[in-house]
Amino acid sequence: MLTTFKATAKKLPEGLEVESSSRNFKITLDEPKNMGGTNKGMNPVEAVLCALGACESIVAASFCDKFGFTYDDFYINLEGDLDPEGFMGNPDIRNGFQEIRFEMHFKTNETQERAEEFADFIENTCPVADNLTNGVKLVRTGVVRDQPINA
């Protein structure tokens, strides 16, 4: 059975600041000042890295007992390469990340082999990793043109 998740992103008046919300939670996304923003939040591609790390962390915590894997601490370092010339209009450069690299850190008494097996499980189970690895169909369902208040 499919579950539909919903979010809204609204451009705020200042700089490139955007308020995104889902359920009763809000986050502010922005760009650094040198990219025209106000630096009031991480930018969207940084948020993608955070979403991947958070998703993999949640999978680790959710499935460690089922997998029979114990750890005291877990974190992920992530980095991605993006050439801003792509979204600035250069048709020869991809707009998004060209590569994302991540390193999982376990504080554990498990063997290296078990840690790598569990890391493989995490990577293969994480929905955000699946979206990034396999892509997802984007469907624009409409464009709504509202009248300005002072029309």
Image (cartoon, grey):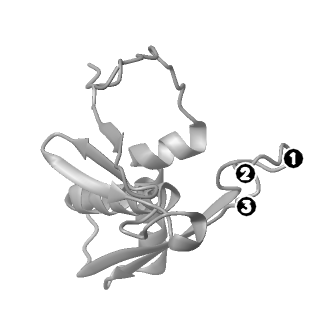
Q: How many marks?
A: 3
**Could you tell me how far apart the alpha carbons at marks 3 and 1 are, in whole angstroms?**
11 Å
Query: What type is the residue that disc 1 sits on?
Result: Asp
Image quarter of residue 81: bottom right
Q: Are marks 3 and 1 in contact (CB under 8 Å)?
A: no
Q: Report which residue position mark 1 lands on.
A: 92
Q: Report which residue position mark 3 lands on.
A: 83
Numbered circle sitting on residue 120:
none
Is 105 or 84 nearer to us in this picture? 84
Indicate the position of residue 138 as horizontal and vertical percent values.
Answer: 53, 26
Numbered circle sitting on residue 88:
2
Query: What type is the residue that disc 3 sits on?
Result: Asp
**Could you tell me how far apart the alpha carbons at marks 3 and 2 are, in whole angstroms?**
9 Å
Indicate the position of residue 114 as horizontal and vertical percent values.
Answer: 42, 70
Image point (22%, 51%), residue name: 26
Packing grade of label 1 (10 A; few <14, some 14-19, many >=20) is few
Q: Secondary structure at mark 1?
A: loop
Q: Secondary structure at mark 2?
A: loop
The numbered mark, 3 or 2, whose residue comes first in the sequence reads: 3
Indicate the position of residue 27 as horizontal and vertical percent values.
Answer: 27, 56
Image point (72%, 51%), residue name: 88
